[in-house]
């Protein structure tokens, strides 16, 4: 005879397994996400920044006003532990005074610190899923102590495209926006509607203004402890639109503490590992917000350090 108690036990077990699967990140059982641009692709959605895209974005320039988006970087800049930064200025070979009959003197400088500090670009070799990185590159195949053999910053092309700036302080009515506040599809579209932005398009750079960078030097402990930012659904939404880069005036771009069901830096995984979307951290958009420069011409050419994971940057936006 069929044992109903055994069937009921099995049904309960199956339900428990299904429930547990819902509680883990969606990509937990998948680590390899092939690039839609082919097996040799190393730049991800920057492939969408075509000459045609650049030409179209250049038409956004109306006043010619340029904005530098990098913040100052120094030994006091708060950063994700254990990152530190130190600058040393030296005058080599001048122990006995200036050089030659023309009495030439000069200064050089040495940086001893982490690249991922201050205003920075996260490359596609920065974050992976179980040691598998963008376009199914396994860490054992390309990560070396003296530099990445693939996905290094030197591969980032010259970038000139449209930037969309979303003022989340105005949307939420607080400045800075409270830590732990996620930006998902509803919040992104709500901010767009409020600012009169009709669309986010392929190859765009999306920047969030949260007021978080104003804490630097005033409340570094709070700045480092968390932040408002992009949520898991919001990251997937922007990825579905084909954006090239996502940035914010915060140190991680994504919301921290993370959403209840989110994994560790899962937004980074969605953007970098799964979709090839570069991340821009600590972007200074304060002046742009004052000028309501919601759409602008964005340009960036990071230093081409071979095999680097990240880059200290100062992008320029022009209104």
Image (cartoon, rainbow, N blue to C red):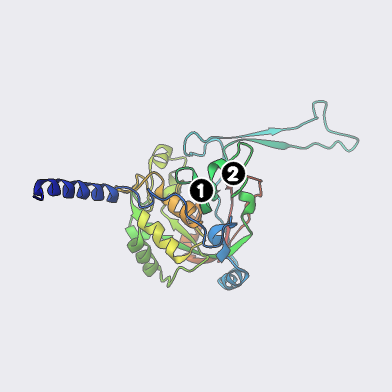
- Residue at image position (49%, 43%) is 131
Whether residue 48 sits left or right of residue 174 in the image: it is right
Residue 253 in view of the camera: no
In the rendered image, the quadrant that contains the C terminus is: bottom right
- Residue at image position (10%, 48%) is 3
Residue 158 in view of the camera: yes
Tell whether label 2 touches label 1 (CB within 8 Å): yes
Which type of secondary structure does the marked residue at label 1 adopt? strand
Name of the residue lying farthest toward the top: 96
Q: Nearer the viewer, residue 105 or 4?
A: 4
Q: Nearer the viewer, residue 217 or 245?
A: 245
Q: Indicate the position of residue 265 as horizontal and vertical percent values.
A: 41, 46
Q: Indicate the position of residue 128 as horizontal and vertical percent values.
A: 48, 46
Which type of secondary structure does the marked residue at label 2 adopt? helix
The residues bearing labels 1 and 2 have C-alpha atoms spaced at a distance of 10 Å
Q: Nearer the viewer, residue 156 or 95?
A: 156
* 1 relative to 290, above or below: above
Residue 11 — which label?
Answer: none
* 282 relative to 54, above or below: above
Residue 133 — which label?
Answer: 1
Whether residue 92 sits left or right of residue 1 in the image: it is right
Q: Nearer the viewer, residue 66 or 1?
A: 1
- 10 Å neighbourhood of mark 2: few (<14), some, or many (≥20)? some
Name of the residue lying farthest toward the front: 1
Q: Which residue is mark 2?
A: 142
Tell me the quarter of the picture where residue 156 sits: bottom right
Tell me the quarter of the picture where residue 52 sits: bottom right
Does label 1 or label 2 sit earlier along the sequence? 1
Q: Indicate the position of residue 25 as horizontal and vertical percent values.
A: 35, 49
Q: Indicate the position of residue 39 as horizontal and vertical percent values.
A: 57, 57
Name of the residue lying farthest toward the right: 101
Whether residue 69 sits left or right of residue 101 in the image: it is left
């Amino acid at each position: 005879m069929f044992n109903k108690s055994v069937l009921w036990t099995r049904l309960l077990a199956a339900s428990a397994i299904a429930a547990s699967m819902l509680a883990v990140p969606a990509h937990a059982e998948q680590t390899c996400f092939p690039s839609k641009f082919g097996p040799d692709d190393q730049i991800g959605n920057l492939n969408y920044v075509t000459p045609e895209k650049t030409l179209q974005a250049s038409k956004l320039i109306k006043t010619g006003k340029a904005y530098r988006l990098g913040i100052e970087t120094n030994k006091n800049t708060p950063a994700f532990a254990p990152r530190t930064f130190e600058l040393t200025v030296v005058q080599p070979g001048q122990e006995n005074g200036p050089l030659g009959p023309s009495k030439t003197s000069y200064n050089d400088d040495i940086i001893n610190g982490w690249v991922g500090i201050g205003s920075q670009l996260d490359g596609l070799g920065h974050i992976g899923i179980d040691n598998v990185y963008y376009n199914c590159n396994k860490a054992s195949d390309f990560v070396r102590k003296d530099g990445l053999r693939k996905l290094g910053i030197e591969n980032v092309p010259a970038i000139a495209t449209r930037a969309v700036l979303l003022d989340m302080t105005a949307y939420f009515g607080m400045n800075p926006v409270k830590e732990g506040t996620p930006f998902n599809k509803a919040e992104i579209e709500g901010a767009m509607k409020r600012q009169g932005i009709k669309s986010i398009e392929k190859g765009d750079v999306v920047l969030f203004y949260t007021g978080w960078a104003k804490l630097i030097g005033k409340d570094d402990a709070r700045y480092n402890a968390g932040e408002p930012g992009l949520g898991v659904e919001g990251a997937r939404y922007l990825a579905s639109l084909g954006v090239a880069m996502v940035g914010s005036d915060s140190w991680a771009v994504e919301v921290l503490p993370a959403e209840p069901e989110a994994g560790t830096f899962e937004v980074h995984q969605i953007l970098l590992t799964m979709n090839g979307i570069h991340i821009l951290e600590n972007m200074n958009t304060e002046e742009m917000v004052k000028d309501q420069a919601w759409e602008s011409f964005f340009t960036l050419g990071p230093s081409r350090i071979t095999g680097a994971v990240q880059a200290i940057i100062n992008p320029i936006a022009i209104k």
